[in-house]
């Protein structure tokens, strides 16, 4: 077979199309509508935030500067797409464990590497939504010819950014494996993609009777301690939470410290929710569904972590933020506590209802939180409505947990 076998290139393209159709069918109508609504709201936010400043810029400096500004916005999106594709592809190649399965097939390295890179960089396609909004905002402000030219150029440039990001991701993954191996780069990475099971002497389990939710809580703690990815995720949430506490000692004015502490507290809550999603995805589907554990036990175990994290965050800030007046401190603690609980519960809902698709649950969590932030920027306090709506919508899917299937 040649280096670029046309038959294999065609086969991989057909596989990519079928995988896309299959993943779309896995989403029910409500989730599809929600994703479309999120895309439209992102477009509306970007359009609103772009058109007015762009109009002022063109009036002050002329159409040429406006065209450059639109091109700069699209270039920033392309850089974001490249970065997202590179990091996601490197993480997927390092995680495995499908390397041996791919290497068992008589595949040419080039189309295989392109297919895996395309799968990893599919998330970058979401950046087409804000790009369309930027182009729409420029209509009537900059010359139509420039808008059409930028629109025609963006699609191939986005495909190129995905391809370059995939190549960079492969290089990043290649740096983590021993040098001097044989074969193409993608073959060398896939050869060590499957994590080696290391034999560890563990203490004999002590069997005792306890509620299902409590057993899951203890299991989550042990699994987080033993698995590096979960341990890093939990540690990152803890580090950001400590940073939010340290913000009160920054050499700045109190209002600025107040703003930074609140923002970092929200980020810590989001990272805690991401850890909860990863915890849900770490459960083996077949094993969990054979155990006598119901929805209440699974949801309650993760809700305990969400409530404990929010309580720890609020208590710590109550002890540290002593410069605030009693009334201001009360408002800060209430808002930060409610936000931490809401974000944590949203992560629990997505992790449970989309089990075992932790990747999809993490994506939905990020989209929902991003939409809430965008709504708050457009209309103050409207982000809380978006967050509450997402919690209620995800909670409606909880009764379907017993009918979930492995995918």
Image (spheres, rainbow, N blue to C red):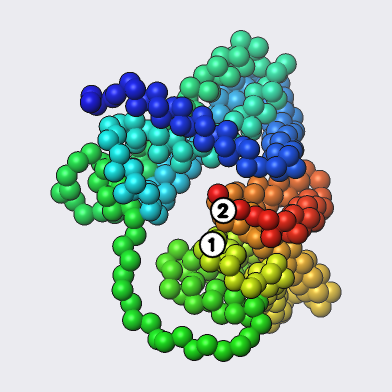
For label 1, the residue is: 286
Relative to 71, say whether 227 is above or below.
Answer: below
Q: Which is more N-terminal, label 2 or label 1?
A: 1
Query: Of 122 and 40, which appears nearest the observer?
Result: 122
Identity of the residue drawn at 61% across and 88% down: 209
Which quadrant does the N terminus fall into?
Answer: top left
Secondary structure at numbered mark 2: loop
Seen at 54% across and 62% down, the residue is 286
Quarter residue 346 falls in: bottom right
Between 81 and 25, the one nearer to me in the picture = 25
Q: Residue furthest right?
A: 327
Instruction: State the residue in front, 185 or 66.
Output: 185
Query: Decide: marks 1, 2 in contact (CB < 8 A)?
Result: yes
Residue plotted at (74% across, 29% down): 52
Side of 91 relative to 270 (left or right): left
Reading the image, the residue beneath label 2 is 406
Q: Which mark identifies residue 102?
A: none
From where the camera sits, is residue 355 visible?
A: yes
Q: Secondary structure beneath disc 1?
A: helix
Residue 199 image point, x, y percent: 31, 74
CA separation, marks 1 and 2?
8 Å
| Res. 313 visible in picture | no
Residue 175 is situated, as x and y percent measured from the top left of the image, at 28, 50
Q: Residue at x 65, y 72 (%)?
A: 293
Crowd band around label 1 with a 10 angstrom C-alpha radius: few (<14), some (14–19), many (20+) = few
């Amino acid at each position: 077979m040649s280096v670029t076998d046309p038959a294999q290139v065609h086969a991989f393209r057909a596989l990519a199309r079928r995988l896309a159709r299959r993943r779309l069918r896995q989403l029910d109508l409500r989730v599809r509508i929600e994703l479309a609504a999120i895309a439209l709201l992102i477009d509306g936010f970007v359009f609103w935030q772009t058109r007015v400043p762009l109009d002022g810029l063109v009036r002050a400096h002329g159409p040429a500067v406006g065209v450059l500004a639109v091109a700069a916005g699209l270039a920033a999106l392309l850089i974001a797409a490249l970065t997202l594709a590179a990091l996601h592809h490197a993480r997927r190649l390092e995680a495995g464990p499908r390397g041996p399965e791919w290497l068992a097939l008589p595949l040419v390295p080039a189309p295989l590497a392109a297919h895996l890179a395309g799968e990893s960089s599919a998330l970058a396609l979401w950046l087409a939504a804000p790009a369309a909004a930027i182009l729409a905002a420029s209509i009537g402000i900059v010359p139509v010819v420039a808008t059409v030219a930028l629109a025609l150029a963006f699609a191939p440039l986005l495909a190129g950014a995905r391809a370059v990001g995939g190549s960079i991701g492969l290089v990043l993954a290649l740096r983590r494996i021993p040098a001097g191996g044989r074969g193409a780069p993608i073959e060398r990475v896939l050869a060590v993609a499957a994590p080696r099971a290391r034999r560890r002497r563990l203490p004999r389990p002590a069997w005792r009777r306890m509620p299902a939710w409590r057993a899951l809580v203890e299991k989550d703690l042990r699994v987080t301690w033993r698995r590096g990815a979960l341990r890093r995720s939990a540690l990152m949430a803890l580090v950001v939470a400590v940073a939010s506490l340290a913000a009160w000692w920054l050499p700045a004015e109190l209002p600025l410290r107040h703003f930074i502490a609140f923002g970092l507290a929200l980020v810590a809550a989001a990272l805690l929710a991401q850890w909860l999603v990863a915890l849900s995805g770490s459960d083996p589907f077949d094993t969990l569904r054979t155990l006598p554990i119901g929805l209440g036990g699974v949801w309650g175990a993760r809700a305990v972590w969400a409530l404990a994290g929010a309580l720890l965050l609020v208590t710590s800030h109550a002890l540290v933020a002593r410069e605030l007046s009693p009334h201001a401190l009360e408002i800060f603690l209430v808002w930060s506590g409610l936000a931490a609980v809401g974000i944590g519960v949203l992560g629990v809902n997505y992790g449970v209802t989309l089990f075992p698709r932790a990747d999809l649950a993490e994506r939905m969590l990020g989209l929902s939180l991003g939409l809430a932030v965008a709504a708050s920027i457009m209309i103050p306090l409207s982000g809380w409505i978006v967050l509450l709506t997402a919690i209620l919508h995800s909670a409606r899917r909880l009764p379907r947990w017993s009918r979930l299937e492995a995918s």
